Image (spheres, rainbow, N blue to C red):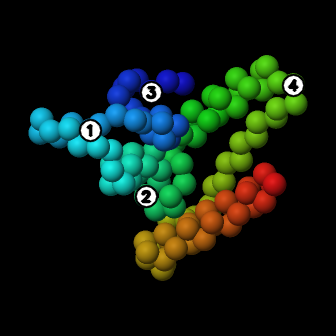
Amino acid sequence: MQPENSDVIDETNAARLKCKLVLQGANIPVTARAERILHDAVHDNLTGLPNREIFFDRLETAIAQAQSDRDARPTVIAIDIDRFRDVNEAIGIPGGDSILLTIARRLLRLVQLQKC
């Protein structure tokens, strides 16, 4: 699934970006700040995990790879936290965000352990 806007920069292209940003007619080299902006564009600002754009891009890549490699078995796990709205209402949004961050970090650690 390709983004409709050809100006969208995904994580891979952002890492390979070797051009200069043009701001008000002046050429400014890509800086850490510009790289951060590119990172933020494709990552969730709460968890820091790749966002939906990267998810669909990686899913498409995994499916294409699985079609040519019989050993590749892409897997998607969907997690729904029942009544999470109730959690936010009971302990507040910052408390709910803290729970989401904890869950995201634990899942990320588990996935990274499996890659070894």
Q: Which mark is residue 3?
A: 3
Residue type beneath disc 1: Leu
Task: Name the element at disc 2.
Answer: loop
Image quarter in which the C terminus is found: bottom right
The residue at which mark 2 appears reads as: 45
Q: Is residue 19 above or below residue 88?
A: above
Q: Which mark is residue 70?
A: 4
Q: Residue furthest left?
A: 24
**Mark closest to the chain's N terminus, 3 or 1:** 3
**Mark closest to the chain's N terminus, 1 or 4:** 1
**Mark closest to the chain's N terminus, 4 or 2:** 2
Spatial separation of the CA atoms under disc 2 and disc 1: 23 Å
Spatial separation of the CA atoms under disc 4 and disc 2: 36 Å
**Residue at position x 33%, y 44% in the image:** 30
Residue type beneath disc 4: Arg
Count of labels shown? 4
Residue type beneath disc 2: Asn
Residue 70: quadrant of the picture: top right
Q: Is residue 106 above or below residue 35?
A: below
Q: Which mark is residue 66?
A: none
- The mark closer to the camera, 1 or 4, is 1
**Residue at position x 61%, y 62% in the image:** 104
Q: Is residue 85 above or below residue 4?
A: below
Task: Name the element at disc 4.
Answer: loop
Q: Position of residue 49 (x, y in %)?
A: 54, 54
The residue at which mark 1 appears reads as: 21
**Mark closest to the chain's N terminus, 2 or 3:** 3
